[in-house]
Amino acid sequence: MKQKINWDALGITASLACAIHCAVLPLFLSSLPLFGVNIIENPGFEYLMIAIAFAVGSYSLFHGRKKHHHNWLPLILFAVGIGFLLAKMQWHAWRNWFLVPAVICIVSAHFLNYRLCRHHAHAHADDCDH
């Protein structure tokens, strides 16, 4: 039995996990530096989370655009969200001002992609390959 992965649900989950990590993790794990573990302000870990969100989101949104709805808006919203995440890493003093729009853009992109894929119900254009 072949099992399909809902890439939009996975993308939304990854985005929300990133938001939870950025917002809640420092509150609960602030004692980790006492034990020599530095995950809270670790740029390598932050970039890894952004890379995972980018990989999952890019695949999910590009697949939805190419195979189902042919709309670029979810990918544009996603790119803006990833841009905000990268800006958060570059201008650390403004990280909270970049985090909120980043999460809103990324989750909105996945939700819009999900809705467009369900709404069009395989309304194919001439460039569809299935």
Image (cartoon, rainbow, N blue to C red):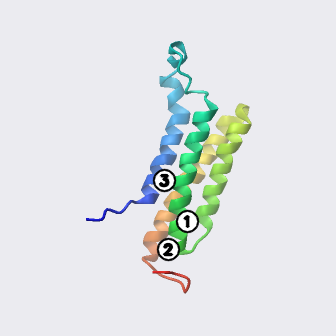
Q: Which mark is residue 11?
A: 3
In-image side of 30 versus 5 (left or right)? right
Q: Image quadrant of residue 89?
A: top right
Type of amino acid under label 1:
Phe
| Dot 1 or dot 3, earlier in sequence | 3
Q: Image check: 106 left or right of 5?
A: right
Q: Residue 104 appears at what percent x and percent y?
A: 58, 50
* Residue 103 vertical placement versus 72 (above, below): above
The residue shown at (53%, 40%) is: 19
Residue 62 rendering spot, x and y as whole percentages: 55, 65
Frontmost residue, 49 versus 93: 49
Structural crowding at the residue carrying mark 1, measured as other residues with C-alpha within 10 Å and reported as few (<14), some (14–19) or many (≥20): some
Residue at 47% across / 24% down in the picture?
28
Amino acid type assigned to the residue bearing label 2 in the image: Lys
Which residue is at a point 46% across and 58% down the rendered structure image? 8
Quadrant position of the C terminus in the picture = bottom left
Q: Earlier in the sequence, mark 3 or mark 2?
A: 3
Q: Nearer the viewer, residue 12 or 56?
A: 56
For the residues bearing labels 1 and 2, Cβ distance under 8 angstroms: no
Q: Secondary structure at mark 1?
A: helix
Amino acid on which the number 3 mark rests in the picture: Gly
Residue bearing the label numbered 2: 67
Q: Residues within 10 Å of mark 3 (few under 14, many from 20)?
A: many
Q: CA distance from mark 1 to mark 2?
A: 8 Å
Q: Secondary structure at mark 2?
A: helix
How packed mark 2 is, by other alpha carbons closer than 10 Å (few <14, some 14-19, many 20 or more), is some
Residue identifier under label 1: 62
Residue 88 location in percent, x, y? 68, 39
